[in-house]
Amino acid sequence: MAGEDAEWVWRERTAPLRPGEAALRRAVLVDPAPGRVRAALEDDFHHFEIEIAHAGGIITVVSATTIRHPWTTCAGAGPLLVERLRGRRLADAAAFDSPYAHCTHLYDLAGLAASRACTERPVLFRMAVTDAVDGRREALIDRDGAPVHAWTLDRETILPPHPYAGRNLRALRQWVTELDPGEAEAALLLRRAVFISIGRTFDPDVQRDVPTPPPGACFTHQPENFDPDARARGSRRDFSEGRAGPLADRIAALAEQ
């Protein structure tokens, strides 16, 4: 990014939201350029990257990289996404296939990247979902450093005094159309972070009786792919204490452009 001010801004955003608090943190970065778009996602449990080349509104080339994930079988989701997404219209990428056949996170990332493929500048979303205390937690998301949503939740229900108090995140798609497009985009991203944050309540590296998603919930949990012994041990990261948040290296690299 040109200019000292822009460089400082991007380097500042390498920090996590709510530093020092026990919380799940997630970052999603989309970096468009003429004819291609790159996107990356990282949180406590996942790190995925995708690149889409396009021409005339059609996806011509796709690459997907599965860097860190909770199951070794998750790596197989990349080739499947590449195969099924290539040749689709950018406009169809958010719903081109059954999401349950894919890695949920790669599928969402591909849809977001495609929706922003023809924009002119990078965008960064940072999220934090604090660990629950008596069932209550805080969920926050900013876009390019500007706050978008801040929810206080009882399990998955938004609490007062928020305008959407009483709404449950499980039903978000039923009321997300009441939000403007930018708020809706951020709400869907933050909802996903809320759902995965429960993973911080157990540690599969030391526990054997940890919960797993239901059969068919995603690529790894399709019956033909599932292997109960395929946990990726030692793959977790906790960004609660560090000064660098998810995707810090990728974000800092934007300062050099």
Image (tube, rainbow, N blue to C red):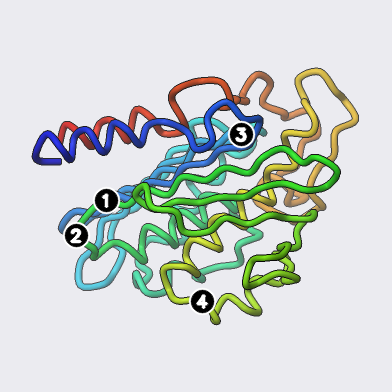
Task: Determine the secondary structure under disc 2.
Answer: loop
Task: Determine the secondary structure under disc 3.
Answer: loop
Task: Determine the secondary structure under disc 1.
Answer: loop
- The numbered mark, 4 or 2, whose residue comes first in the sequence reads 2
Labels 4, 3: front one: 4
- The quarter of the picture where residue 13 lies is top left
* Mark 1, residue position: 122
Q: CB atoms at circles 4 and 1 under 8 Å apart?
A: no
Task: Determine the secondary structure under disc 4.
Answer: loop
Labels 4, 2: front one: 4
Residue located at (37% from left, 57% from top) = 113
- The numbered mark, 4 or 1, whose residue comes first in the sequence reads 1
Q: CB atoms at circles 4 and 3 under 8 Å apart?
A: no
Residue located at (20% from left, 66% from top) = 55
Q: How far separated are the C-alphas under marks 4 and 1?
A: 23 Å
Amino acid type assigned to the residue bearing label 1 in the image: Pro
Q: How far separated are the C-alphas under marks 3 and 2?
A: 30 Å
* Mark 4, residue position: 179
* Mark 2, residue position: 120
Please tell me the numbered disc located at residue 45.
3
Labels 1, 3: front one: 1
Q: How far separated are the C-alphas under marks 4 and 2?
A: 23 Å
Q: What percent of the width, then of the height, locates residue 188?
A: 55, 62
Amino acid type assigned to the residue bearing label 2 in the image: Glu
- The numbered mark, 4 or 3, whose residue comes first in the sequence reads 3
Q: How far separated are the C-alphas under marks 1 and 2?
A: 7 Å
Q: Could you classify mark 3 by the number of other residues whose Cα lies within 10 Å: few (under 14), some (14-19), or many (20 or more)?
A: many
